[in-house]
Amino acid sequence: MQVQRPVMTQEQRLKMSPQLYQSIQLMALPIQDLQLKIAEEVEKNPALELVDDSKSLSLDEIPSKKSDDFDPFENTSDPGYQRVPDSGEDTKRKFLEGAVYRKESLQDHLLWQLHVTRLSEKEIEVGELLIRNLDSNGFYQENPETLVKTEDRDLLEHMVHIIQEFDPIGVCVKDHRDSLLVQAHLKSEMPEQVDRLLTEFMELLEKGKYNEIIKQLKITKDDWEHILGFLQSLNPYPGSDYSDASYNYVIPDLIVRKKDGEFVIVLNDEEIPVMRINSFFEDIQDGGSAAEDKKVKQFVNGHLRDARWFIGSINQRNQTLFKTATVIMEFQREFFRKGAKYLNPLTLKDVAAEVGVHEATISRITTNKYIQTEWGIYELKYFFTNSISGAGSSGSRFSKEGVKEIIREILAENTAEKKLSDQKISDLLSKRGINIARRTVAKYRNELDIHSSFRR
């Protein structure tokens, strides 16, 4: 199926400056990757330096002088957040003891977003078919039209457009050209000639024949530089970040503790190196000995601007992560008190509305971020689950994951009746006010890796 680009909607989208793109990337990084990113940035930017004694300066204490009005996301600031208290090696050991292994593929990431989006059972079914038909780059392995009946083609097209807007954007397409087209139309202020360039002159672009492109499009070199800069913000292989999925050693980013009978979130930022601005660079900017050298001033000002933005972006990441976890904890308070079967229905939209950011930001900030609880270590994504009716938090009070835990509990309680049928389980659930069909019980049981009554 040749997928047409999505229809542009009258929706305000974020303009992607290089600094903002960097901020968005930092949102998605777990602690280990963030450590590497900080080391890389300090290496290339002489205006940045690491604080030898991290306890002497926190991110919140970075001077705001000449801050360039850092504000990449509106309404994401938080008055403060708790950090892991300085309790020496004992605190670090507890986090290390809680470390877990994780593995997430592109399909895992897309399927998770599918299941926390408010969709009908039929839409989810078609969405799963589409996602499982994607290769590691996010491209079709087979013509998607072969996956559904003729009467479901419109639904298929509808789900294609939904999945194309998932993170990473631009999957669920035939090839890298279509991916670039989808991404281009989903970003703000797409240069006028980009659509024609990708549609008619892709071969010239891939061969680097830029002068020929300028001639064919009848544009100036400045226009071309603008177009090229825009294209460089796109990823022709959007699934590439997940193509090398492997088991990784991870440390919880957050921990839930009980204090005076109330739950509190603690941010594990002891593992994040603390940076500061190089005082020599600030002296030059303030009019030091090299003030008369315009080129030196430009060099210094550029690196100072980038350094302050980078420090601010990490601070913003931590605040958004903390605020998101706090909102999740408020929604899922019963889970933290009583365990997994009390997990409430919750969607990305619910949390995004409370935090004051786009759903895509919540998706990024919860990906590969882990929280240590009394019941074990969970990826933040775990707490997003639709109700059994598929209507999100506005529907049934029972979440899918919660119902699965209740099924597990029923089977564990009935040790003398190991051969409880799916229909019998459905009847027992009904007595608890949970009305789901026998086939749904069978589906949840399979997801729990529990055999049928015949095999049991």
Image (cartoon, grey):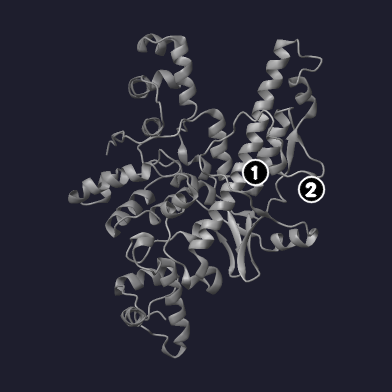
The crowd level at tag 1 (other Cα within 10 Å; few <14, some 14-19, many 20+) is some
Residue type pointed to by label 1: Leu
Secondary structure at badge 1 equals helix
- In terms of image quadrants, where is residue 394? bottom left
The front one of 146 and 55 is 55
| Residue displayed at 72% across by 51% down | 270
Residue 34, which numbered label? 1
Residue 373 showing in the rendered view: no
User: Looking at the picture, does residue 159 appear above or below residue 46?
Assistant: below
| Residue displayed at 37% across by 64% down | 387
User: Looking at the picture, does residue 52 appear above or below residue 284?
Assistant: below
| Residue displayed at 76% across by 43% down | 57
**Residue 200, how many percent across, how many down?**
33, 20
| Residue displayed at 24% across by 48% down | 155
| Image quarter (top left, top right, bottom left or bottom right) of the N terminus | top left
| Image quarter (top left, top right, bottom left or bottom right) of the C terminus | bottom left
User: Looking at the picture, does residue 282 appear above or below residue 215?
Assistant: below
Secondary structure at badge 2 equals helix
- In terms of image quadrants, where is residue 453? bottom left
Q: State the separation of the CA atoms marked 1 and 2.
A: 19 Å
Residue 55, which numbered label? 2
The crowd level at tag 2 (other Cα within 10 Å; few <14, some 14-19, many 20+) is few
Looking at the image, do the residues carrying marks 1 and 2 touch, with CB atoms under 8 Å apart?
Answer: no
The front one of 196 and 347 is 347
- In terms of image quadrants, where is residue 28? top right
**Residue 24, how many percent across, how many down?**
54, 39
Q: If you read the primary sequence from the N terminus, does the residue marked by circle 1 or circle 2 appear first?
A: 1
**Residue 438, how many percent across, how many down?**
30, 75
